Image (spheres, helix red, strand yellow):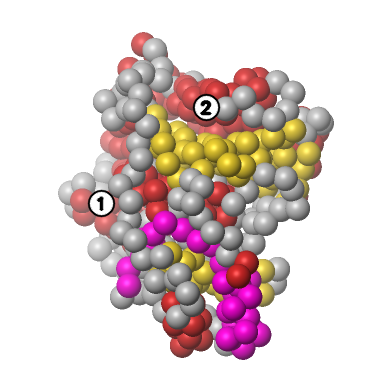
Amino acid sequence: MADDLPSHDDLQLVRHTLEALPGVAEAEVLLIADGPRAAVSALVSDGRPLPEPSLAASPPVRMGNGETQVVPGCLAAMERAALLAIAHTLHTTGSFGDSADALGAAPRHRWIVRRWLAALASENLPAPPSRQELARAMRDLDAARQELGYPAEMGRFFQTALRSLPRLVRDEITLQSLLFAGGGMTTARGNYRDNLISRHLNRAAAEAVAARAPARVLEIGGGVGATTDAVLAAVGEVDYLFTDVSAFFLDAASERFPRLRYALLDVNAPMALDEQPFDVVLAANVLHNARHAGRALAAIRELLAPGGTLVLIESCVEHHLVSASMHFLMSPRADALLPGFADVRQGQDRVFLGRTEWIRQLAAAGYRDVRVEPAPDDPLAAAGQHVFTAVRGDRHPDPAQLLSKAAEALPPHLVPREIHTVDALITDRSLRP
């Protein structure tokens, strides 16, 4: 951690100060990005136990139709190809069972190598695959890709990524250069929109947004606009604010969706907007990027109008194919100010929260009436992706007074940039300041 960042003792001082304020029983303190610097952020609760998740009663509904029956088998074929490609990479570089040093892994990607070694150990693959076995698995992957409706560009992306693992892990090439080859978005849209799995998930998210009959919608992390397409088709003309952390995506979206409004927004920085509250906040495949999921959910709750709805699409399973491709997007930059997660994922080589973890996080952050699709026995559930819908709870006090009192008691550089009031904290007390 950089020398100019608040120390562990500094953050501990902030926590103790907050916990001494009236109405605060527990506080969790972390650092967030604030422009080129870091700032203190805090979550506080009145100490009540984590509430039982409020799951909305609804009859089980199959998200797809007969076409989704192929999902489990196709994903199994794709997973096997990824696992064999990982095994081939580690064995041919002499790094199987060894540290990331043997592979020459860039420091920021070493967590991925640890994931690979753990995956091979769990799958009991001590021997390298033969060339014939690997070639057959690659053919099976492409056949599965076609059956799931991924475009040819996505097939080339999968094949190139799996054959380029040594170069990717050494930072000789970037995954962005493969995913956005030539500056285009066709491959990325194939991953997030143009396939059977994403089509059903985006449709379910769009139906959840439309069910609220919103007048104002905020989309966080809109990216390539894959879910935006489905939502706009479902809701028609609404006041729609499309946000992303990247001006590249905002520029591209403004050409496709000229009627929307646009703004930069980072889930790992202060998320206050100079806007009226929104009826719906949509976040598709973005909140796993949050350094602290609970903080992000609490900040989003404050953007919602009373009774407003949050709609999430999130991956909840660490697939081998993702570890051999998209996870390279999750490695911290070499010059990252605040690398690593600060929530329940801290110190673990994983990116995604599980289905049950998201339900608990939503309950702790002050949401109710949580709905989750697909059902566990739905064939589409094999994809490990879920649509979460939750309603904003209403009992949270305005933290403005807490901020004022904290400013009186703390040195200026340790005054929290933001304080969020939540129902409960989900944290490992042995790790927090």
Kindly indicate the quadrant of the structure image that contains residue 154.
top right
In the image, residue 360 lies in the stretch drawn in magenta: no
The x, y position of residue 354, in whole percent, is 34, 46
Q: Residue at x 35, y 36 (%)?
A: 55
Q: Residue at x 63, y 81 (%)?
A: 407
Going by the numbered disc 2, the residue's amino acid type is: Ala
State if disc 1 and disc 2 touch (CB < 8 Å): no
Per the rendering, the mark at residue 424 is none
Q: Nearer the viewer, mark 2 or mark 1?
A: 2
Q: Residue at x 40, y 54 (%)?
A: 364
The x, y position of residue 56, in whole percent, is 37, 32
The x, y position of residue 201, in whole percent, is 48, 27
Kindly indicate the quadrant of the structure image that contains residue 241.
top right
The x, y position of residue 335, in whole percent, is 61, 72
Going by the numbered disc 1, the residue's amino acid type is: Leu
Residue 287 can be seen in this image: no
Using a 10 Å C-alpha cutoff, classify the residue at mark 1 as few (fewer than 14 neighbours), some (14 to 19) or many (20 or more). Answer: many
Query: Depth check: 184 or 89 in front?
Result: 184
Q: Kindly identify which residue carries mark 1.
A: 120
As drawn, is 146 to the left or to the right of 174? left
Stretch of the chain drawn in magenta: 402-429
Using a 10 Å C-alpha cutoff, classify the residue at mark 2 as few (fewer than 14 neighbours), some (14 to 19) or many (20 or more). Answer: many
Decide: is 203 above or below 173.
Answer: above
Per the rendering, the mark at residue 208 is 2
In the image, residue 420 lies in the stretch drawn in magenta: yes
Query: Depth check: 288 or 100 in front?
Result: 288
